[in-house]
Image (tube, grey):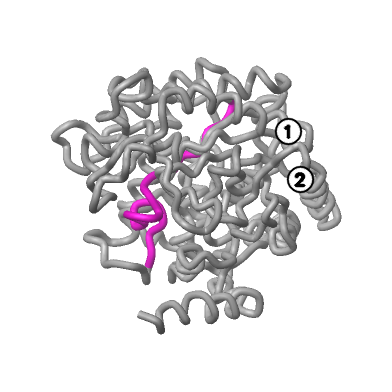
Amino acid sequence: MTNPYEGLLPFSQDCSVLKKPLKIGNKTAPNRLVCQPMEGCDGTTDGRPGELTLRKYQRLAEGGSGLIWVEATAITPQARANPRQLWLTKENQDSFKELVELIHTSARNAGWETPVVILQATHSGRYSKPDGAPKPIIAYNNPLFEKELLPPECIISDEELDRMPDLFARTAKLAEECGFDGVDIKACHRYLCSELLSAFTRPGRYGGSFENRTRMLLDGIQAAQSACGKDFLVTSRLNVYDGFPYPYGFGVQEGGGLDVDLTEPIMLVEKLVNQGIKLLNITMGNPYVNPHVNRPFKTGPYTPEEEPVMGVKRMLEGTAELQKRFSDLPIICSGLSYLAENSPFVAAGLIEKGGAAMAGYGRITMAYPDFAKDILSHPDRPLDSGKCCIACSKCSQLMRAGSFVGCVIRDAETYMPFYRRDVLKKEDEK
C-alpha cells in the first residue's frame, strides 16, 4: 500500500518488526506493542480494581501486547483523581496480586507469552478529586489555567514534597511484591511531577532552576530503585513538551512561543539514564487543556489550529530525537491511535528507522483490545477499521463527567448506558 502520510510520518509496508522481542533490563517483552495506561475510573472506594478494571485487563492480556502499562494508581488518598481511582495499599495488596495473576493467566490461556506489566504510580496534583470534588494540589499558580489565583494552601509546600519520594518508594515496593515487573513514577500530562518540571516561577528547593524543577522526579525514582530489587524496572511516563509557552511549559524556550525545544528534556533523560533507568515512555501535552497535542481528535471540545496528524508528527519526531540520542535506552512512543488502521505501518516505520523501540497505543486499547493480535497475526495488513478508535472524544467526556471510562462506540453495550446517564444528562441540564 502507498504511504498516506508521505513526507509527514515514517511508514513501512511490513510490520514484522513489531513481532520482535525486546530486552528491557533483565525482563523481555515478547513483542514491541504496548498498551498505554488508560484510566477507567472503575476501582473501588478503597482503591482495589473493580469488575470493569479486571474485565479491561483480561481483554488486553488476551489481545497479545508485549507490555501492559497499568493505569494511574495513587500513592496517597489525597492524590486520587477521582473516588474510584486505583490506590495500592498494604490492606488491598492481594487484589493487585490477583490483577497481575489475571493478566499472566489470560495471556497464557490465549496462547501468548507473558507480557511485561508496569504499574503507573501517580500524584494527581492539580487534578486531585479524592471525594469527587476538586481539591487541587498545585506546584504553582498558572494564569493559563486559573482565571483566579488558587489560595496559597493549594500550593504544595517544600516539606510536603520532601516526603513524596518515600510515598513513591512505598508504592513501588508494594507493586514489586504484587508481581508487577516495574513501576512508573508518572511525570506527564500536568499531574504533580509533570507540573514541577515547568515550575520556573516557584521559589524554594523545587522551583526555578533545572536542578530544582527535576528534583522530585529524580528523587522519587531513586527512592523507588532503592526500595526494590535490582531486576525491578523503575521507569517514567514523561512529558517532554507541554505545549504551553515559557514560563508555564516544559520543553519550550524563553521567547520561543509554542515551538518544541528538547534541550531540557534531553538533559533530564541523560540524568535518568545515569540513574540506571532501563525504559522510558514519552508523551506530550495536557489532555485537559490542549488535548490536540497528545490525543489528536476528529471531534472534540474545540477546533485546533493545526491538522490532527501534525500532533502525531510532533509526538513521533520528539520521540525519535530522544531515541536516536539515547540509542541504548528503549523508548516507547505515543500518539498512534489517531492513525487507526494505518497505525501499525507508521509504528513499524518509526522503529525500523531507530525512532523508538516500542509502539504505544492508548485510546485504541479501549475500542479494540485485541489490536495487537491482529497486528501480530497479519503484519502485512491494516487493522480492522470497524474496530478502531474513531477519535470522537466520548471516552474523555465520560472522564470529565466523573463516570466509568471506556469506548462508547465499540463497547457500546457496556459504556453507552454510562454516557447516556452521566454525559447526555449533564448536557441537557445546560
Identity of the residue drawn at 17% across and 41% down: 257
The main secondary structure of the magenta stretch is loop
Q: How would you rate the neighbour count of disc 1 (Cα within 10 Å): few for under 14, some for 14-19, many for 20 or more?
A: many
Q: On the picture, is 50 further left or further right than 396?
A: right
Q: Are marks 1 and 2 in contact (CB under 8 Å)?
A: yes
Question: Where residue 54 sits: x, y (%)?
Answer: 74, 58
Q: On the picture, is 362 further left or further right than 31?
A: left
Identity of the residue drawn at 72% across and 61% down: 59
- Mark 1 or mark 2: which comes first in sequence? 2
Q: Quarter of the image for the C terminus: give it.
A: bottom left
Q: Nearer the viewer, residue 346 or 161?
A: 161
Identity of the residue drawn at 76% across and 45% down: 96
Q: On the picture, is 128 further left or further right than 108?
A: left
Mark 2: which secondary structure? helix
Q: In this view, does 307 lie above or below 235?
A: below
Q: Which amino acid does label 1 sit on?
A: Leu
The image quadrant of residue 61 is bottom right
Q: In this view, does 364 lie above or below 224?
A: below
> In the image, which disc is placed on residue 96?
2
Q: Nearer the viewer, residue 216 or 332?
A: 216
Q: Which amino acid does label 2 sit on?
A: Phe
Whether residue 259 is visible, yes or no, is: yes
> In the image, which disc is placed on residue 174?
1
The residues bearing labels 1 and 2 have C-alpha atoms spaced at a distance of 9 Å
Magenta-tinted stretch: 278-297
